[in-house]
Amino acid sequence: MENNATCHDWITELSGSIAVPHTLSLALGQCRIDVRTNSADLEKDLVEYFKPFMCIPGSRPADITVTALEGDPVRVPFPLTVKQPDPGKTKIKEEYHDFSDGRAVHKRLTSMLFFFNETENLAIGPCLANSNQVINFVNNRFIGWMLVRGSLLGHAAAVKKNGRGLAFAGFSGMGKSTLALHLMSRGTTFVSNDRLLVHAHPGRLTMEGVAKLPRINPGTALNNPDLGTILSDEDRDRFSALKMEELWHLEHKYDVPIESCFGPGRFELESSMHGLVLLNWKHDQTPMQAGLVNLAERRDLLPAFMKSAGLFFLPGDRADELDFSEEAYIDLLRECPILELSGGVDFDGAADICLEFLDTGNLPESVQR
C-alpha cells in the first residue's frame, strides 16, 4: 500500500476479499446499525449482548454499517501517534493514525485495529476474544451519529418511570450505576449506564442511552437482591468476608444483564429528561445532604457530567458547527433541575428522593432550594 493511501483504501484492502455471511441489525433509538461479520461465534456473542435492541435485518435501511472481521492481528504499516492516558491513569492503551478521510485506532493490549470514516467502519483482528471492544466500537459509531445531529454527551447513567427520565452523574467512583440499579429494584426502567446523549427540543430535553450493560463491583451485587445471580457461590463467600470500604475499591467488575435480573422490557434507550442528579458525596458517616444547584454558579460540578467523545469521534465537515464547550452544556441544562447529593454516601436515601421526583414530579421538602 502506498504512503498516501486513504482510510478507504485500507478498509478495501483488508476486507475486500473476505466474505461476511453473518449480519445482525440493531435499533438504537432512531438509529439503525447493521453489524456484518465472518464469524458465527462473534455474531452469537453480539446477538446475546444486544438482545433488547435487535431488529429484523432489512426492515429499514441501515444508518451505519460496521464490519467485524475475526482473524489474526494485523501488522500496522503506518506510523501511529500515542494517545496519552486520561488524568489519573498511567497505562498507554491506544494509538492512532489520521488519514485524509478517516482514522485508524490500534489497541495495544489486544492488537485490535479499527478503521472509520464518514461511511465505513471496520474492526479487524482477534474480535471474538475481544468482543467487548467490538461492542464499544458499535456504540461509539452510534454516539458519533448522535453528536453530529446536535446532542451533547454526558458521563451519566439514567432511568425512567411514568414517562419521566432522571440522569445520574458523578466524579469517578461515586456510584452512579449503583444508584441507578437501586432504582431499578424499585420499579424504574433502565436507560443508560455510563454515556448519555442529551438533545434540546422546544420546551423539553430528551436523552438517549447507549446499549452498554452496567459494570458493577462485588459490593453492589452483594447489597442488591436482584443482582444475586451475578455472583458465583465462591465469589459470594469470598467477598462477603470483606469490609464495605474494601469492596468499594475492588477492581473486580461484573456485567449486569438488565433483562435477566429485572425482567423483559426493562432496558429502553429513549426518554424525556426531567432532572440530573450529581453525586458529590464521600464515604464517611456524615448525613447525606441534597440541594438544588445552578450549574452556571457551580462550574466545579460540570466535569462530573461533561464527557469527551474521544478518539472514536470524527466530526467531519460538521466540525465548525459543533459546540462542546462548558457554555453549551450550561445552556442545554439551564431549565433542567440539577440536584447535588453531598455529605455521606446513602443510596437508600438518595433512591427515596429520586423515586419521589419520578413518581410525582416534586422533590421532598427536605431538599434545600
Image (cartoon, helix red, strand yellow):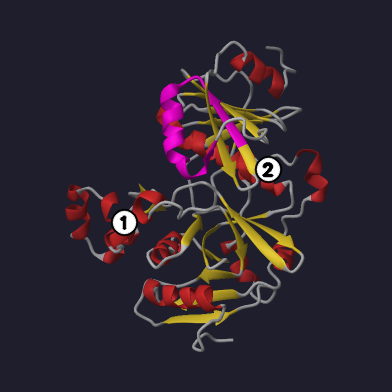
Q: Position of residue 202 (x, y in %)?
A: 77, 65
> How far across and how far down the image is residue 22, in percent?
51, 23
Q: Between disc 1 and disc 2, whose residue precedes?
A: 2
> Which stretch appears magenta?
33-55
Q: Nearer the viewer, residue 354 or 7?
A: 354
Tell me the SS state at disc 1. helix
Does residue 311 appear in this view?
no
- Residue at 27 percent across and 55 percent down: it is 228
Q: Secondary structure at mark 2?
A: helix
Q: Amino acid at mark 2?
A: Trp
Q: CA distance from mark 1 to mark 2?
A: 33 Å
For residue 311, which quarter of the picture?
top right
Residue contact at pointers 1 and 2, CB within 8 angstroms: no
Report if residue 217 is visible in the image.
yes
Query: Residue 227: which numbered mark, if any?
Result: 1
In the figure, residue 220 lies in which quadrant? bottom left
Question: Which numbered disc covers residue 145?
Answer: 2
Instruction: Residue 255: give x, y in percent of width and height.
Output: 38, 47
Q: Residues within 10 Å of mark 2 (few under 14, many from 20)?
A: some
